[in-house]
Image (cartoon, rainbow, N blue to C red):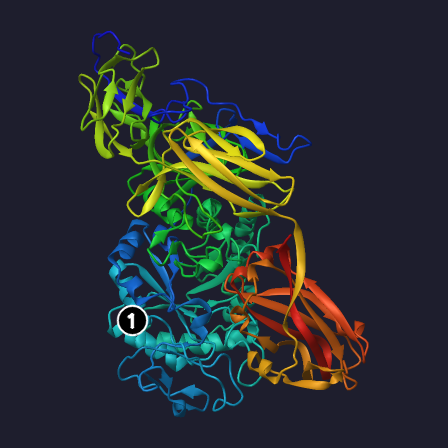
Amino acid sequence: MTLNPCRSNSVTALVMAALSLPVGCLRPPELAAKPGGPVAKPTESTQGVPNGPELKITATRTSESQNGSLRVSINASNAIRTIKKEWFLGTNIAIWNQPSTFTSPEVLQQFRDAGIGLIRMPGGSASDQYFWNGNGVLMGNTIDRSKYKNGTWKVDYSKWAPGFMGFFGFPKDPAAAQLNNWHGNSNVKHEHDFIKALHADTLVTVNAGTGTPADAAEWVKWATREGYDVKFWEVGNELGGSWEAGTVRPDGKTMDGSLYGKIYRDFAKAIKAANPKVLVGSQGGVDFIKGALAQKDAPLDFVTYHDYFSSDAPSPTALFQTLDKIKPAITEVREAVRKLRPGKEILVGMTEVNAQLFEGSQTSDLNSGLWLTSAVLEMMEAGLDFATQWDAFTQKPDKGGGHGFMIEQGALPKAEYFTYFILNHYFGDRLVQAKSSEKSVRSYASRDANDQLYTVLINTSQTNGYDVELAVEGRQVAALADCLRFSEREYSWDAKASSTPWNSGATQMRLPVLGGKLKLAPASLLACKLEPVVAEATLQVLGATRLALARGASTTVNVLAQAAGGHPAANALVLAQAADGFMVEPKQAQSDAQGMARFRVTAPVAPGKTWLEFTSSGARGAKMNVNSVEPQLVVRAADKAPAHEPLSAVAALRYKEGDRYALIDSYDGQATLDAEGAIPTPLALEHGLAAFTLTSGEAKKRTFELKLGNLSNRFEVEFFQKASAEHVVYPFDDSKELTHVSGKAKFQINANVRPNQGVLDIALKDAKGWTQDVIVFDKLSDVPNLDRAAIEAVSFDLGLGDNFDAGNDWAQLVVVLQSEANYWMPLDFVDLSSVKKGEFKHLTLPLKPEFQKAMKAFFKLILVVNSGAKVNGSVYLDNLGFQIQTIK
């Protein structure tokens, strides 16, 4: 198609890749969308065997054509507060990270791109076991026990050597206590050097669990001499938690806020004596904060706490609801500071934060990035002074993704990484008021030192898109803006493989932002720079500034002509040019009454890249990058699923970009899904994506084939009937099984309790309150033929000896599971009074649904006694095992 030439006008040509129009095709096409025509309607295939719906395929459109309306009001003059933004772009690094990570130029550059401005070290709970300097104590991988005297390690501080892990807690007999044989993959010098090279601020958590104020003071002196310029020194990590080394003190007392306050005072004084210029602060919940604040003679510059807002949110809706907890929690801490230290300016920080404690899909998928972005912005508004996300790197795929914002091997960014990248580049440090008419859309706005106005809109709804009516007070803004989009088109997470099927990062776009033209897709984020009205005609690019086309494919590009002042210019002559095999038609086009001209761009069959240039007489020229890429048709779906239950799946058209994959979101068209026992089902790919569900009416393995043009993808799903079988791991008939057991109680194999078999005899003495680690089974990850991911319940036989005495009060047995993905998963409390002496009771304790997702990385089972009085005597355990989900 060609347009008649027309008289040129002095205008700006604005180029927009028509992402909202169904325009693309693959060559040679088998099924393709008609250029400019409609995408196929969603259909359902329920035909299977003649007798009934054996297989159901439901295709779901992803179109934004049915968006609701949304009003976002920004008052550029209504200031909320000014923040130090780089202190909110913070994270944690740890001694279990590899040294090569801290010397990688790629990792360093990624941190710089994300604007990481504050890093906490040396690593969470390890901080309260780790001694930063091992000089004279650690020889190779062996610790010289003779250097442990009077409850402390005698380190030679005349020089530095890699640190070591000491005892867990305070052993009554250090000479006999088991020491760690692992002392970190990296060390504090690796961490300090990395942070120094990054030019970020440092927050060190000193060992207040098993270390001393003198140890901390020596670290301050050394870091100062070495020029590391550590700004924050935090005393201890989560010392109120029973999992933490040092929660129980050498004198047997259990840590509480009052005791911590006294410990904090001693550490804080020692740290300030070593360097009065540094900031020192407390760490813990509100009771610990109050304990530190109550020590009036203790220097206190900041307080910190941790929050994992959910143990495991059952749905995205529940996940985003946890955001409403942030401001009240910060207000509570601020109020405690105000009351106990009136008139004193004390900073408040959150040094560990993530959506949930459980490490799984919701700490790795798209929603994790949307959640963290909103959480950081809520913290900024609520009065927090700094925050460090937990944590920078994920190591193990069996954690289900982990908390890390990067996968350490390969330095692969995850969704939470893009939180920081977006806020670093598209948000300022002077917060202003922004309000959204829809609760599911969270809106924020800010200015920077140059008075540039920004807004961030986060749509937490998984199903509803919006046409946004943006109203700005106190500033006149242009109709177009540079924006970053972060959505499923940029990032996808495969929970089964713990990897990203496509991961291109936030897309830079030029978008109309006024007049209700700004579109906000479901489960997405838009961050925009709201620019002042331009007084001259300019050329601007709308839509993605980079366009990827499958080789040989075509798409429509819309060009908007703008006159001075940003008004659309009708009857403007817009010229187009492409190079290196790309074809653009027509070569020139006249804009319509709305200032729009349209061009069709076709990529060459051979992969390659070039640019498109659009010009108009008297206007500034505009370019956009275009790639001809090799397409891949992929399916993201589980390979096993229960019969009769819908299995969600996504089909996508992607291409490889470096060592990652990106979506070809310029493609709209129709794919076909074939399956045995069902008629072919059309799937409408819109912007390169199609969502659908599979439901099998019977348990069987099914083969599917997805077809698009000359591309295809075959995949299998094994549908199964839910069933379970008991797998006994420890029958306790052999004393060799005791090599898998440790704990605080005395235990033995007793062959005299049950006929012809042994039992585990657990001898309790004065167990009272919450007695942890009575028995620990810590080699379950090595059990052969145990499908840990399929564990649904723990089962065992429980008995009581004739000498058992609950102290005339209640006593309970608690089974706790530990996983690399979730370190504390308690099952039901077993009332020991329900067990008759001389008899065995068979118990099956089911896992909570949120715990089952962590069982892939399950490694330890712990028995805990919970009581109201001293408990003595024998508890018998037999036939310990699991209920395993099986496939019929």
Dot 1 amino acid type? Lys
Residue 169 placement, left or right of 588: right
**Residue 102 seen by the camera:** yes
Residue 297 placement, left or right of 137: right
Examine the image and state in which quarter residue 708 appears. Answer: top left
Front in this rendered view, residue 774 or 842: 842
Residue 253 placement, left or right of 194: right
Where in the figure is residue 888, as x and y percent of width and height?
64, 52
Q: Which residue is mark 1?
A: 189
Front in this rendered view, residue 527 or 772: 772
**Residue 459 seen by the camera:** no
User: Vertically, is 792 above or below 273?
Assistant: above
Tell me the quadrant of the picture where the N terminus can be found: top left
Where in the figure is residue 736, as x and y percent of width and height?
58, 83
Front in this rendered view, residue 346 or 163: 163
User: Vertically, is 748 above or below 722?
Assistant: below
Q: Name the residue at 42% across, 50% down.
A: 499
Examine the image and state in which quarter residue 116 appears. Answer: bottom left
Where in the figure is residue 468, as x and y percent of width and height?
46, 28
Q: How many marks?
A: 1
Q: Name the residue at 32% across, 82% down.
A: 140
The secondary element bearing badge 1 is classed as helix
Q: Name the residue at 39% across, 33% down.
A: 711
Where in the figure is residue 498, as x and y percent of width and height?
45, 53
